[in-house]
Amino acid sequence: MFVSSGRQLTLPSSVNDFDGATTLEAAKAFLERAFGIGDVVEGLPAEGAERGRATVRHVTPYIFVTKEVIYSESVLLHGLEKPDKARDIVATMPYFLGVIDEASVLAERKLRQLQRVLDREEAKEKFRTTAESVLKQRATSLLAEAQRIGIASEAPPGASEDELLNRLRTVGSTQVEINAYPNESELATLHGRRRDVLSRLESVKRKTRATKTAIREASGFHGAVTRQYEKLELSEHLQGVAHVCPLCEAPSERGRETAKALQAALAKVRAENAAVERIKPRLVEHDRELERQLEALNTELREIDDRIQTWLRQNEETRRLADLSQVRAHLLGRISFFLEASVNEPRLVTRDLSVLRAEIEELEARVDREARKIKLQRAERRISQFASEAFAQLPTVEPCIGSELEFSSREPEVVVMEEGSGAVLRIPDVGSDQNYLAIHIALSFALQRYFESLNAPVPGLLVLDQISRPYSPTKGEDEDEAEITGGEEDEDVQAMRRHIDFLFAETARRKGLQVLLIEHAYFADDVKYVAATRERWTRPSGRALIPLDWPTRQDE
């Protein structure tokens, strides 16, 4: 790759004269900086791998109005007809419209990365918590058995995983004679605790159902009160006229009493509405607290059930072994096996996610998607205004005569707002190549006008490929060029002249805009058109875009 920039550069006459040798990626970065695209940061993925990264390729839809676009009913901008390109064009459009800048693009990219990291860490934390819960449950069960047969003390509530494992190691290394069967009173105590938990659980469930019902009723009541309030607001208009008859303007005490009653009803409804708005958040918070209580009670119930099952299993094993020494040896063997297995259990390091969450919150505040949405709507309104002004100057047929254009960047698309009826028409609905042409020309110039006002990194250049495509000039028709020399003209030639006049007027009005028109039709009687023509590639002239004297291959 060879890249150089500047003014009045000398064009090389051979490959050996090229200056500015560089690598492919560095050349792309150079071109993007020359265009004013600042979204170029070291370490970013290759071009196209990151959605929303603006490159020099993404300015082409706003410059080239090709033959596939200029009077198409389905393609709005160059490149949108190709799905692999359309995705990136739509994603980078907010950048070129000035809705986002390099900083916000990078902030959003980092936000997505941090959110993915947070999701992974939360999944690991959930897995670690689950694994720890299972390990603690097994350790607690073994300690409960050891405590019942008198070789361990009861583990304190809320003991950590490491503390439970240390207690089990102590039990496994202690030589203590077994002298007691499982205590029968413990089972009764556990059943009593279980009944108490079930009773509290049922009470909390009843409260939860009642709270949810109250929330639904409050929401319904709030809607009804709101509707009543909107109806009663009409009484506000009776303040100055309630004391007279609306027909004869005679004093009316009944009207004053009616207005006073409506005002009283309105005040009552307003107070009820305010009361609902105060109470509903408290009900929601109370519902959340009840849900937390339900979760805690269910956890406690599972622990009690596990202890009951452990007691029954131990009692059964004790009776089956018939010898407490065998029970002790059996339990110690299980503890030893559990400790050996727990050594190989995966231990995930706990990570403090508060810093990560704080950074994500800071980035979300900087990205501010709501502000971006407002900026995008403002840009669309301005482009729609510019496009409608240009559309009014171009030749159209019904239903587009006098209509306005509305531009949306999200699809993107342009709709026609029909004059008079206000009907919304998509491009395929306007039903004329002449209308399609006018829409594309108007949108292209509107985008360029908006880019100029914004100083966006899009060159002030439009390349138009044959505006005569929807028309058929009747004078001087030739397979290479149709020369128009004046005289009586049909509607198509007149429409083409309006387009040409529009191009000259816009380029004169826009200081930073250049238009390159590739056109078969040649207006020989138009002095401005003749003066602006740079090349005439016709068969009689012997000139062509690819020079005819260039060498050809022998097999051609």
Image (cartoon, helix red, strand yellow):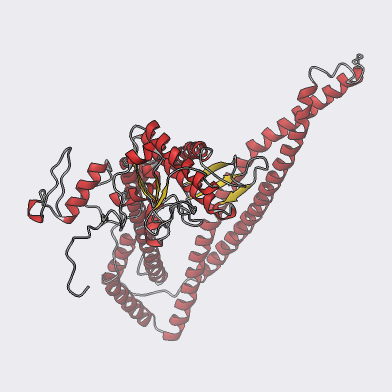
Residue at horizontal 32%, vertical 49%?
Answer: 54
Residue at horizontal 13%, vertical 43%?
Answer: 10
Quarter of the figure with the N terminus: bottom left
45 vs 76, left or right, is left
Q: Looking at the image, is 234 positioned above or below residue 485?
A: above
Displayed quadrant of residue 502: top left
370 vs 352, left or right, is right
Residue at horizontal 63%, vertical 53%?
Answer: 208
Displayed quadrant of residue 250: top right
Q: Is residue 158 visible?
A: no
> In the current view of this chain or complex, which residue is farthest to the top?
251
Quarter of the figure with the C terminus: bottom left
Q: Position of residue 193 (x, y in %)?
A: 55, 62
Q: Looking at the image, is 90 positioned above or below residue 510?
A: below
Q: Position of residue 98 (x, y in %)?
A: 38, 39
Q: Is residue 253 visible?
A: yes
Q: Looking at the image, is 408 positioned above or below residue 550?
A: above
Residue at horizontal 30%, vertical 77%?
Answer: 337
417 vs 30, left or right, is right
Q: Position of residue 424 (x, y in %)?
A: 61, 47
Considering depth in this image, is 147 or 169 the residue closer to the camera? 169
Considering depth in this image, is 50 or 163 the residue closer to the camera? 50
Number of residue marks: 0
